[in-house]
Image (cartoon, helix red, strand yellow):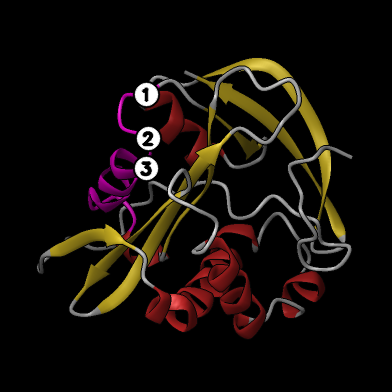
C-alpha cells in the first residue's frame, strides 16, 4: 500500500473525491468567492464533502458503502487537513455564505511521484457543476504549475476536465480501497 494514505476512514484508506463533474445543471446568478479554507469551515466542509461523494460516486460505489459516509467524520478529517502546514493548499468556493465546492493540493505523496505537487481532491456540489467555479478552484490550488493526480478510471467527466487543463494519463494505474470497496484509478500528469 502506498504512503499516500495516512490512516483515512478505517479500512477506507481512500482516495478522496477525485474530480469535478462537468454536467451543466445551473447557471450562476450570484457571485462565487474562492478563498482559503478556515478552521470554522470544518463542519460545512464535512457536510459538503459527504454530499459531493454521494453525488460523484453513486454510480461507482454501492449505496451500502456510501451509507457509512459521515459528515461528522469528514469534518474531523478537514480539521486535520487544515492544520498540515503552508505547503498544503485548500480552497473553498463560497456562494451566499455557503460552501459549494473545495479543492486541495500539496506535496507529492507517492514514492514514484512524477511531479513534486499533487492535486489531492476536488469536488463541487452537482448543481454548481459547469458554472466555471470548478475551474476557479482548480486554478487556486494548481494554476499552471506541473502537478499530478489520481482519478477514477470510470469518472469520464473528471477525466475530461483534467484533460482540458493539460493533464494526460501517463500509464500508471492501480486499484485502491475506497469506503470498503475498490476503485480503479489512473494517474494524470501535467
Q: Is residue 31 above or below residue 98?
A: above
Count of marks placed on residues: 3
Are circles 2 and 1 on residues that touch, CB within 8 Å? yes
Q: Is 37 in front, or is 50?
A: 37
- Residue shown at the point (56%, 58%) measured from the top left: 56
Q: Is 69 in front, or is 106?
A: 106
Q: Is residue 166 above or below residue 99?
A: above
Are circles 2 and 3 on residues that touch, CB within 8 Å? yes
Q: Considering the numbered disc 1 on the image, is that residue within a helix, a strand or a loop?
A: loop
To which residue does mark 3 refer? 141
Q: Is 90 in front, or is 47?
A: 90
To which residue does mark 2 refer? 142
Magenta span of residues = 129-145
- In this picture, residue 110 sits left or right of residue 45: right
- Estimate the x, y position of residue 71 in percent, counting from the top left: 60, 81
Q: Is residue 42 above or below residue 133?
A: below
- Estimate the x, y position of residue 2 in percent, counting from the top left: 83, 37
137 in magenta: yes
CA separation, marks 2 and 1? 6 Å
To which residue does mark 1 refer? 145
Amino acid at each position: 500500500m502506498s504512503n499516500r494514505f495516512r490512516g483515512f476512514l478505517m479500512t477506507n484508506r481512500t482516495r478522496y473525491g477525485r474530480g469535478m463533474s462537468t454536467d451543466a445543471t445551473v447557471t450562476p446568478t450570484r457571485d462565487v468567492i474562492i478563498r482559503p479554507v478556515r478552521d470554522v469551515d470544518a463542519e460545512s466542509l464535512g457536510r459538503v464533502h459527504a454530499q459531493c461523494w454521494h453525488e460523484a460516486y453513486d454510480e461507482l460505489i454501492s449505496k451500502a458503502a456510501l451509507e457509512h459516509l459521515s459528515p461528522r467524520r469528514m469534518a474531523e478529517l478537514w480539521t486535520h487537513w487544515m492544520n498540515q502546514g503552508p505547503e498544503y493548499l485548500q480552497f473553498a468556493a463560497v456562494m451566499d455564505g455557503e460552501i459549494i465546492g473545495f479543492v486541495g493540493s500539496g506535496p507529492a505523496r507517492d514514492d514514484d511521484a512524477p511531479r513534486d505537487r499533487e492535486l489531492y481532491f476536488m469536488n463541487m456540489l452537482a448543481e454548481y457543476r459547469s458554472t466555471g467555479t470548478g475551474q476557479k478552484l482548480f486554478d487556486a490550488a494548481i494554476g499552471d504549475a506541473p502537478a499530478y493526480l489520481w482519478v477514477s478510471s470510470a469518472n469520464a467527466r473528471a477525466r475530461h476536465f483534467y484533460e482540458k487543463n493539460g493533464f494526460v494519463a501517463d500509464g500508471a494505474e492501480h486499484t485502491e480501497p475506497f469506503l470498503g470497496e475498490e476503485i480503479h484509478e489512473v494517474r494524470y500528469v501535467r
